[in-house]
Amino acid sequence: MKLELLLGDEAIGLGALHARIGGAFSYPGTPATEIFEFIEEHSRGPHPIAARWSANEKVAYEEALGMSYAGRRAIVSMKHVGLNVAADPFINSALTGVNGGLVVVVADDPGMHSSQNEQDSRYFGEFAQIPVLEPGNQQQAYDFAREAFELSEKFNLPVMIRVVTRLAHSRANVRVLSEDELPPVSSEPRPRPDPNHWTLVPSNARRRFRRLLTMQPVLVEWSEKSAQNELRLSGRRGIIAAGLAGNYVREALGGRGDFSMLHVATYPLPTEKIRSLVGHCDEIFVVEEGYPFIEKRLNGVLGVPGKAIRGKLDGVLPPDGELTPDAVAAALGLPFRQVTSAIEDLTGRPPALCRGCPHADTFKAIIDATAGHPGTILFSDIGCYTLGVLPPYKAVHSCVDMGSSIAMAHGAAQAGAHPVLCTIGDSTFTHSGMTPLIGAARADADMTVFILDNATVAMTGGQQTMAAGEQLLNLLKGLGVPEGHLHVIEPLAKNHEQNVALLSRAINHRGLSVIVAQRECIHTRRKAVTEKPAAKAACASCGQ
Ligand SMILES: Cc1ncc(C[n+]2csc(CCOP(=O)(O)OP(=O)(O)O)c2C)c(N)n1
Ligand code: SF4
């Protein structure tokens, strides 16, 4: 073994590499992005693996599932809302089962540091009825990633690893396998089972669903026996902590041993261990990041007679946002040290488009072109351009989920609203904007679509985009956008007047217009100019 200083995300990536995956699949999204990026960076070498961004999370999941069916191990990673997009194959793959181990890593973002909500993916794991592992630190992130592939093949099910932002994005020393301890790379894929397992026509699906149901007691038994769920019985006050929250509890306890404690790391919940703790204690604190998932199950409808269950539901812990060691200490009635940092002394600064951003010039043109239309509605999508909601632009009227802007504009156009505009980036367009545009083009909907082609996925750090420039224009024509109403502008201050004139014509046209604003993000452009292509280094850990 050797020590490496790793982010939680990197620890998962390395664990997957050390489990000898055949491929990694993902669509960028904070706080999960670095899992794929780490694997991609180490994907070449003596044992190359497939690692290429996918068009969206559903595609990523399906590519991973296809690799699993073909007999190789695959990891698919995404942010929590990405699993909403991938929900269809995710849920159904629990029925079909897998062949090569399939691990889905979902990174939740309590506190919404960079997300549109803070949903708790453990519900998704329970909904699909598959095993879920929740690491509490970087070491477990590495260990669980390797173990998850073993479990997936043992149970013939996809396995979920749930992490949260604070774990994904913080570093710690991790003991990892050294080169000579790694398992050999198998040259042969696993043999394929009966294809009826994977073909969900009703007769097969019913049979596979029954199999999933009969697996549930097996999964509970595994969870019950897992050494990862540590139980310590001492005082009559008890704590059930899940994942990273266990660290906050340990920090708050500061070594005192008068609280009984169960640290949960696997789902389905280890019910006997929970019963032991609850039976031993009078007052039980449930400390978990996200929703009160465990706490709700303890309370049920009527609560536990004679026991006080404390947590997010009774208000001793905040129901939203991230937990902190201070909040946990306060809930437990323990002294805490209010940690202040220099950052808190800084004046808050709202986010803003970068100086020189192409989106800024597009918004300026939109604002001037719609000045005579006080009823303008502008549906935005998710990307840097969502910042057009803030001053000085204040041009954006909605942002709900990725790919929504075109469909929502089409809905508003069908309600008779005019003018209806929407803004969507090139990556979000290929993620899930293309499908609604087919319907809008077919209906010649009375709306103007702005595709902000900055040739990158800027918001998540400048990853490669699927279609930009000429390729994007050809795609739009192929989707049915009439060539006479497909326009290209270059959003630059010097072009402002002519852009405003073109936009005004397009907005006044009572049918579909699509305007592609083509100018590269200033950061990726600068990077391309200043950076020579660097040779990719082989992985220091595994040589992959
Ligand atoms: C379902 C989902 N997946 C991923 C993300 C993370 N995310 C936010 S915006 C974005 C794409 C931004 O790219 P683009 O639309 O091209 O706009 P840009 O930031 O380049 O202006 C991504 C991947 C998300 N919010 N939701
Ligand atoms: S990162 Fe690029 S696209 Fe995003 S605001 Fe800055 S310049 Fe604009």
Image (cartoon, helix red, strand yellow):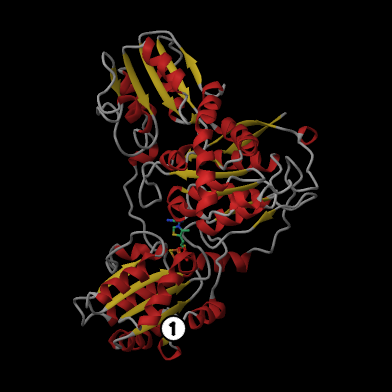
457 or 519: which is nearer to us?
457
In the drawing, does residue 60 fall left or right of residue 237?
Answer: right
In the drawing, does residue 92 fall left or right of residue 109?
Answer: right
Question: Residue at the spot x=47%, y=23% of the render?
Answer: 263
In the drawing, does residue 461 fall left or right of residue 190?
Answer: left
438 or 487: which is nearer to us?
438
Query: Would you identify the image quadrant in which residue 310 lies?
Result: top left
The residue tagged 1 is 481
Q: Is residue 338 visible?
A: no
360 or 342: which is nearer to us?
360
Q: Is residue 341 visible?
A: yes
Quadrant for the N terminus, please.
top right
What residue type is disc 1 on? Answer: Val
Say above or below: 522 vs 40: below
> Where does residue 293 sit, x and y in percent of width and height?
37, 33
Question: Residue at the spot x=43%, y=29% of the render?
Answer: 245
Query: Would you identify the image quadrant in which residue 378 lies?
Result: bottom left
